[in-house]
Amino acid sequence: MTDLHTFIREMPKAELHLHIEGTLEPELMLELARRNDVQLPYETLDDIRAAYDFNCLEDFLQVYYLGMSVLITERDFFDLTWAYLEKVKGQNVTHIEIFFDPQGHTERGIGFDTVLGGITRALEQGNKELAITSRLIMCFLRHLPEEAAFDTLDHACRCRDYIFGVGLDSSELGYPPENFTRVFAAARENGFTPVAHAGEEGPPGYVSQALDVLKIERIDHGNRALEDPALVHRIAASGMAMTVCPLSNLRLKVVDDLTRHPLRQMLDAGLCATVNSDDPSYFGGYITENFLAVQTALSLDLAEIVQLGRNAITGSFMSQAEKSISLDRFDAFCQGFPNN
Ligand code: HPA
Ligand code: ZN
């Protein structure tokens, strides 16, 4: 057990489901509020932590959008992203595919280029100084109209070299994927790789729609797909990855207890499930803490942890050449443990 936890801490990891705005730690939130003279309804770190008591996705999103209000300048977005990179470097993360929510900022009058500039500058520095490779995925907020998503896509097309994919996040229930059919088609035509949050709170039909209509290449969350055996079979047969977020699921009450988390069921069904942190500052853990918590709750064995670690590489958007280098490095780590 201790050895398994050491293995988890030390293994090279890829993270595929991470909202950069969800890495805003309370300390940095207060610092940026002071720096930018932004009024928050919190005065102390304890006030902030007390607000992180969610009953559902919607509760969380209100606190998440409020937290974003301290992010104003390019330097703020750099500092936010750099703090995440340094944190996960310490967790042996070697590759990240991260989301950002430009509409959460442009709606407040912050320029798209300010947001993207700060994030990409940190990612480039992370590649050079920390050897962390990355892909950036721009999410559309599904509680806003498709027209607003089109405006956001126009910005992304101007900055094509910096944005790898498009995603769909925010409130799920009542906002089916099909609302975004046209903007996803336009994004695909412009070469962006499509993904979407689906089946976190929404029904299995939203997962099927995201596959059929948005033509996504990876499913973010996907928990409720398990309610439909034919859909599970379809996803497993396709080999498509699912980005599962155990501590997020616990904190947003997608599962009532981690011992009842469906991760093992997913692996047993042949799904390419991966472990991710979603919004680590809000949900109480980065990728390592997610692995440790779900290993403990489900008594996952070494073979299952190895499978999850490999799934993150095969399910990533790295090139085939990058994947084979990463898999070799991962396998070498496994063979050398505990002596490496
Ligand atoms: N679900 C939907 N939208 C989000 C999430 C999430 O878990 N995190 C940040 N935006
Ligand atoms: Zn998410």
Image (tube, rainbow, N blue to C red):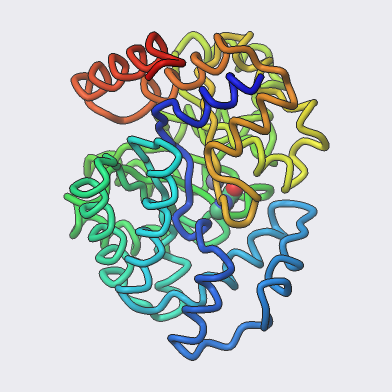
237, above or below 113, in the image: above
283, above or below 334, in the image: below
**Residue sitting farthest toward the right:** 256
Q: Quarter holding the C terminus?
A: top left
Side (left or right) of 47 relative to 305: right
Displayed quadrant of residue 214: top left
- Report x, y in % for residue 245: 60, 37
Question: Which residue appears at 69% of the width and 52% of the height?
Answer: 57
- Report x, y in % for residue 130: 27, 46
- Report x, y in % for residue 170: 57, 54
- Report x, y in % for residue 187: 30, 45
Question: Which residue appears at 29% of the width and 66% of the height?
Answer: 118
Q: Quarter holding the N terminus?
A: top right
Question: Which residue appears at 55% of the width and 63% of the height?
Answer: 25
Side (left or right) of 74 relative to 279: left
Marks counted in the figure total 0
Question: Which residue appears at 49% of the width and 91% of the height?
Answer: 37
**Residue sitting farthest toward the bottom:** 37
Near-viewer residue (239 or 318): 318
Side (left or right) of 228 relative to 149: right
